[in-house]
Amino acid sequence: MSIQTNMRSFWKKYHFAANQTRLFKAGYSEIVVKHIQNGWLVKSEVVDQASDDLLVEEVDELVDGPNVLQFYTGNSNELIVVPALPNKAVVFKNNKNIKISAGESANLFFRIPLTLQFYFNEVKDENRLMEIPLQRLSDTWFGEIDSGEPAYSIGSNYYKSLKEVDARIWEAIASVEIINNTFGVLDLQRLILRVEEFNLYLKGDQILTNYITIEFKGQDQAESVSLSTRDDIQGKNIVLIAKSRLSESRKLLRRSFFFIKNMYQN
């Protein structure tokens, strides 16, 4: 029988007995994990109907086969289940004619499907068994043909306030403030979010990213971008549930977080 769990009781450390097998259900993914001598067996499957909840259940067996991955990790019997954002940047395409007047700002909120990561013993890169996206996003290309980059599309949906966001329990909410510090109107056409650089925070049964502030200074100038937390977004008692994929030193080597194509109007 499936056991419905909340955020805190799903994203955690699990202890496995010898040959114990669990089924994890989240989003459009189902993952069966079995603890074996000196390691793990893991089988993942994409399903047609997304789960509305985060579910864990005991199952009888996982038989080794061609679709089952084997991991030999020593005698550890601890498996840590961690949320993460996608492994590539995501792109929002504006088809709602969002325009920001000179000296004004806009607050936009986005839903981003999470990725489930498995670690044994400790959350560090060398201990990661695998990761499974909880919803398959469409591939897209951002930028010029010869100088752009591959990314994922999150479509054109956005929200104007945090209260409006109807995120599912396996999605994160990204809060973005765009400040137009120019003398013309900013026509927001496409927005790329480098989610590999965002932390994840837990607030009740919601997972939120950093609060992202972008100051647009003009087409020929680099944007000023900052990541922060705010009491009205992440809450007063900040609960960090997952660190960003990139270390601070690697972040400094990355180019601008965002590219906003703009059009000035007189």
Image: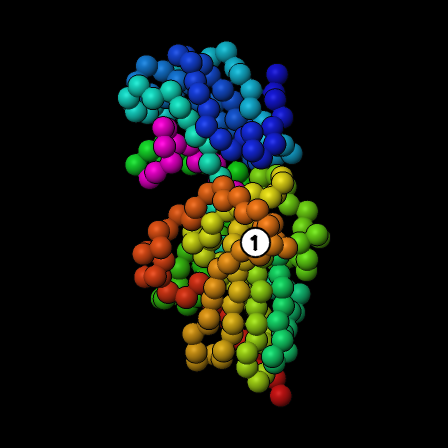
Percent position of residue 251, x then y: 36, 58
The residue depicted at 63 percent of the width and 55 percent of the height is 232
Residue 176: quarter of image: bottom right
The residue depicted at 46 percent of the width and 16 percent of the height is 21
Query: Residue lying farthest bottom?
Result: 266
Query: On the picture, is 60 further left or further right than 162?
Result: left
Percent position of residue 62, x then y: 44, 16
* Residue range of the region highlighted in magenta in the rendering: 112-125
User: Quick check: 61 above or below 200?
Assistant: above
Do we see residue 166 in this rendering?
yes
Q: Is residue 162 magenta?
A: no
Q: Residue tagged by mark 1?
A: 174
Total tally of numbered discs in the picture = 1
Q: Nearer the viewer, residue 187 or 167?
A: 167
Percent position of residue 117, x then y: 44, 36
Residue 157: quarter of image: bottom right
Q: Nearer the viewer, residue 66 or 239?
A: 239
Q: Quadrant of the N terminus?
A: top right
User: Quick check: 150 above or below 71?
Assistant: below
Q: Quadrant of the C terminus?
A: bottom right
The residue depicted at 47 percent of the width and 49 percent of the height is 199
